[in-house]
Image: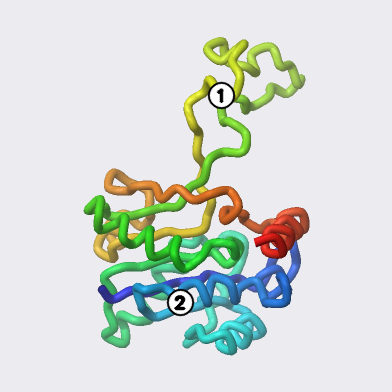
Amino acid sequence: MEILYIIPARGGSKGLPGKNIKLLAGKPMIAYSILAALNCKHKGIVLVSTDDETIAAVAKSVGAEVPFLRPKELSDDTASTTDVIIHAIDYYKNKSVYFDLIVVLQPTSPLRISDDIDTAIALLNEKNATAIVSVCENEHHALWSNSLPENGSMKDFIREEIKGKNRQQLPKNYRLNGAIYVSRMNEFSKYKGFIHEGTYAYIMPANRSVDIDNLIDFKLAEILIANS
């Protein structure tokens, strides 16, 4: 299979400025995702899509390809990951380079390992799926969450069907962890996304599912790496 690994890494970050190249346990955070892709059994092109020259330089030093800088319209808060992926695919199409699979690895999930990626790709073939998306068990069950009215009343906050039940009595509940998105190229072109009828979940453990958005997440990742 011809595989394109895409690591989208925009320069601007409000929650944790410079997070994509912030040193995490001595390595730029983006390096973890690049090395995870490079060390997979399933080899392919490892591309970092960025608008930032410093991120590009760091990515190249680790071994990723950075053949372009993203255009301005794909570099602000409103740019979607789908548009970034399509831009990368089109770049290679224009060079007559085609892929069977695309694998998107968010750099904010540095604890995901090569074996996770390889297993997700193997699961795609085992299930004859069109896409695989990584998830982990929810830390707090979604049934214990709800919206609030403007006055803050919690009158109907807890649903009747779960009142009096503890966590162990509820069905397991999962969330997207943002670590791995795999799709067959034809289906991605058709659906412009990863979650549809032919998508299956790859379940990851909590300790490899940290998605770094702020300093608390970053510190947690440091602790997990130090104790791994």
Q: Which percent across, then down, holds residue 200?
A: 34, 47
Which of the 4 image quadrants contains residue 142? top right
Q: Which percent across, then down, holds residue 102?
A: 36, 68
The answer to whether any part of residue 137 appears in the image is yes
The residue positioned farthest toward the front in the image shown: 227
Kind of element beneath mark 2: loop
State left or right for residue 96 relative to residue 13: left
Disc 2: which residue: 39
Residue at the image position 54 percent from the left and 64 percent from the top: 106
Q: Residues within 10 Å of mark 2 (few under 14, many from 20)?
A: some
User: Could you tell me the amino acid type at mark 1?
Assistant: Gln
The residue positioned farthest toward the left in the image shown: 128
Q: Nearer the viewer, residue 123 or 158?
A: 123
Identify the mark at residue 195; answer none if there is no mark: none
Identify the mark at residue 168; answer none if there is no mark: 1
Residue at the image position 74 percent from the left and 62 percent from the top: 16
State left or right for residue 186 relative to residue 225: left
* Sequence-first tag of 1 and 2: 2
Image quarter in which the N terminus is found:
bottom left
Classify 141 as above or below 15: above
User: Could you tell me the amino acid type at mark 2?
Assistant: Asn
3D distance between C-alphas at marks 1 and 2: 38 Å
Residue at the image position 64 percent from the left and 27 percent from the top: 147
Q: Which percent across, then down, holds residue 91?
A: 38, 81
